[in-house]
Image (cartoon, coloured by chain):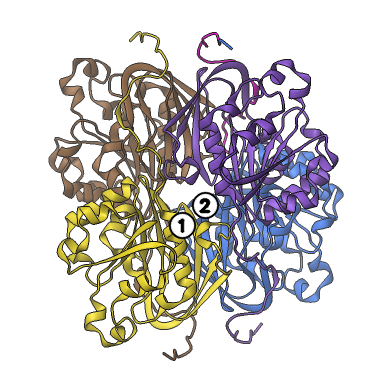
Chain colours: A yellow, B brown, C purple, D blue
Amino acid sequence: MINVTIWNEFEHEKTDDEVKAIYPNGIHVALAEGMNGHGFAISTATLDQDEHGLTEEVLKSTDVLLWWGHQAHDRVNDEIVARVVKRVHEGMGLIVLHSGHFSKPFKALMGTSCDLKWREAGEQEIIWNVNPSHPIAEGVDSKLILEHEEMYGEFFDIPTPDELVFISNFEGGEVFRSGCTFRRGQGKIFYFRPGHETYPTYYNPEILKVITNAVKWAYPTSSPAPVYGNSQPIRELKIPVV
Amino acid sequence: MINVTIWNEFEHEKTDDEVKAIYPNGIHVALAEGMNGHGFAISTATLDQDEHGLTEEVLKSTDVLLWWGHQAHDRVNDEIVARVVKRVHEGMGLIVLHSGHFSKPFKALMGTSCDLKWREAGEQEIIWNVNPSHPIAEGVDSKLILEHEEMYGEFFDIPTPDELVFISNFEGGEVFRSGCTFRRGQGKIFYFRPGHETYPTYYNPEILKVITNAVKWAYPTSSPAPVYGNSQPIRELKIPVV
Amino acid sequence: MINVTIWNEFEHEKTDDEVKAIYPNGIHVALAEGMNGHGFAISTATLDQDEHGLTEEVLKSTDVLLWWGHQAHDRVNDEIVARVVKRVHEGMGLIVLHSGHFSKPFKALMGTSCDLKWREAGEQEIIWNVNPSHPIAEGVDSKLILEHEEMYGEFFDIPTPDELVFISNFEGGEVFRSGCTFRRGQGKIFYFRPGHETYPTYYNPEILKVITNAVKWAYPTSSPAPVYGNSQPIRELKIPVV
Amino acid sequence: MINVTIWNEFEHEKTDDEVKAIYPNGIHVALAEGMNGHGFAISTATLDQDEHGLTEEVLKSTDVLLWWGHQAHDRVNDEIVARVVKRVHEGMGLIVLHSGHFSKPFKALMGTSCDLKWREAGEQEIIWNVNPSHPIAEGVDSKLILEHEEMYGEFFDIPTPDELVFISNFEGGEVFRSGCTFRRGQGKIFYFRPGHETYPTYYNPEILKVITNAVKWAYPTSSPAPVYGNSQPIRELKIPVV
């Protein structure tokens, strides 16, 4: 059983009629429903909850956290950000979606600006699988076509991903590293590009398959936590002559 | 002409007689002298200077910054740290030495704890070249032997390096990824393990050769700065039918 | 159910009394017994069998192939080698053990000499886990100690591994990238260093845990096979004006 | 002084009027002229010469070899292929251009099929720089636009590149990893996609800048050649008790 927490800023869906029409209960609920049937225990959390819904208890029992945010990144409390980052370091998986590229936890974990080019023109995105043997690509076709999406374009200011799984082609001419894995501490991170709030991307079964695969991939490994600090030698040392 | 700034915390050398005996003018001066003859324009900066010697002007004119710190990491002002990180993102090279693994700029750029095992026992370190065609290994032998060094052991909590150049074997039984490259924004970063303050490591010609090579490697590329934000299509878009 | 085929050259065990005493039925049988209890369907194959036991049928039904060879690499038929390489390209996992570094299939898949330093002196090897969140390190301790092993030392002439999971420290002073992953075509490859024929390494439960994890990791992904060749455009092209 | 040898199959230019019109003296001569002014000592070699122009002497004195081939890959002698691969292992740089992806030396060095999708429709290619601090991107703009090129599309069956420098967007909807680095033995390899014989791509100053940068990047490092084989311990071993 994988404990999944879906965090959503949940602002656009309350204030923008176009978004409300697509995600009436919020992106987090659409994702939770779409990820049904995989044996995940799914909870949701949103910005306006106490501690943004990410209490110590919630995070402690979360195996994989999904993160969608956009217009309210700066309203996420720094203490909660530090808590999320610490849990990733301890092994919690993190799936960062779309405009979450600019979220505080992702930027803190990357160490870069995470900036990019963008355009809201409803253009076609074709997402190509460039790592077909990767578990996140399990059962995924060679390409996914989204007829209308926001464009994200390179240069995407991230560290070189540990693994590149998807690259997008946009109708206007850009490319984007759309599916990227990173390891930070004991935690696995997957950034997945699609999901602008004005398009029904998170109802697309192929997109949901990728996210579901990513959750399974990001599940923490049960290795002993690394031990740091002052350490006794395993082999006898010669007495140093200084 | 490469403008190099060597930043040193410069504390041990003033308060500890053993260290003072090895580096009477400070590690920064030993490094500056040791890197002579390569056509670098070398300056130094230390913690106790105004703005730690790292004013906007100094950083702006620095191509590659070296960083040695140990016991006073927390006394480095956060504003200066942000300034260093920003300059790395803009393209300034950064060479982080030894206990600089725990410095604020390195941790901010890595997004991890940067923790490790350590032992001060003056044991033998053998540094193996595992990437002989890398420019940082230019003219460097297959192994470097340091008779007495502090031990650093895995797990070293860093992101997977872009390139692994050196791995150390310690007499007590540990291994360590001793020479690691990373790219963050437009800047190149090299972490190089050796250099505990109680050993004359920075007088070793092979160690100096590696550091000198790293400076040349980390010199900024003169590509145009990436452009981010709202972007016009290169190709004409079909009108989206939503 | 994962179909595993363990291929062993099976020469030392028949001609060398010391080896026979350790692996009376061959390394392949010791491995098969040691990997029991994980729900694998395990078969073995050896050099002296028809087609080295690796017929089209056997390989077609093999999900993950293990390979141990040493003194008879050149007696492996090139046609069988091509068959193994093709199956890896199609998705079959491959676990290459110890002296298998010099096997024909591994060299063909790497494109390098795969050469290294070695010493048969029964010295201590300490294998450090440098990628604790990797599935191959699942449940594996931070270090594995083998009191007596053959030494393998860097420079190990392989392409940069996709992922580095283990690094060994040898008593005599060397280091070695002991656990390395590679992807070739649709197939996943894991090279794992330990296992000289004169030591009981493959009875060590920790070593068996790593190999078992690697089998699970290398199981083929069920993505559609890539399509190559002449391809129709997805979007309408403007008529080119040459 | 960098000794560059440009190898060209030189078949299309002799038999196809359209190609002859663009490259009357062959692609190799166009490249040699275009790379003028960088202090390279440039020679050319072609398929129809004795030993394809790649004698032991020629290769021994070559620092960086460029390779363009297409319709006659199978006419390249296997002995010459082995010679080229061996020289790469020894440190010679190799720049593989366009349809050279299917050349024998490249396939032998990659260990994969190197297959891909393609389409000859004269469509627009936009090449994006995704690694702006890489020396191969030195002075190169964020994107290069080629109005008419052959399409190459993913999945491109290569090992994960050590570094990804360029990604292409094609008008028809595909993407391609267009600029990839690999290290094999002591040699550096750069694969660069553009350059179909029916388009004047190799007269494009930006394309020539990339190739010129790649030559400088691929120049051999002057480190001592690795030593392999039976090796004495650096530290005294305890006598093993078997």
Asked if residue D166 lies left or right of residue C44, the reply is left
| A87 up-or-down from B20: above or below | below
- The mark found on residue D131 in the picture is 1
Residue D237 colored in magenta in the image: yes
Amino acid type at mark 1: Asn
**Residue occupying image coordinates x 80% and y 48%:** C55
Q: Position of residue C179 (x, y in %)?
A: 54, 37
| D4 up-or-down from C36: above or below | below
Asked if residue C142 lies left or right of residue D48, the reply is left
Quadrant in which the C terminus of chain D appears:
top right
**Residue occupying image coordinates x 48% and y 36%:** B165
- The mark found on residue D163 in the picture is 2
Q: Position of residue A73 (x, y in %)?
A: 23, 66
Query: Between residues D220 and D26, which one lies in front from this camera angle?
Result: D220
Mark 1 surroundings: few (<14), some (14-19) or many (≥20) residues within 10 A: many
Principal SS element in the magenta part?
A: loop
The magenta-colored residue range is D221-240
| A126 up-or-down from D62: above or below | below
Instruction: Look at the numbered disc 1 and give the secondary structure of its residue.
Output: loop
Amino acid type at mark 2: Glu
Query: Between residues D190 and B34, which one lies in front from this camera angle?
Result: D190
Residue B121 colored in magenta in the image: no
The reply to whether residue D81 is in sight is yes
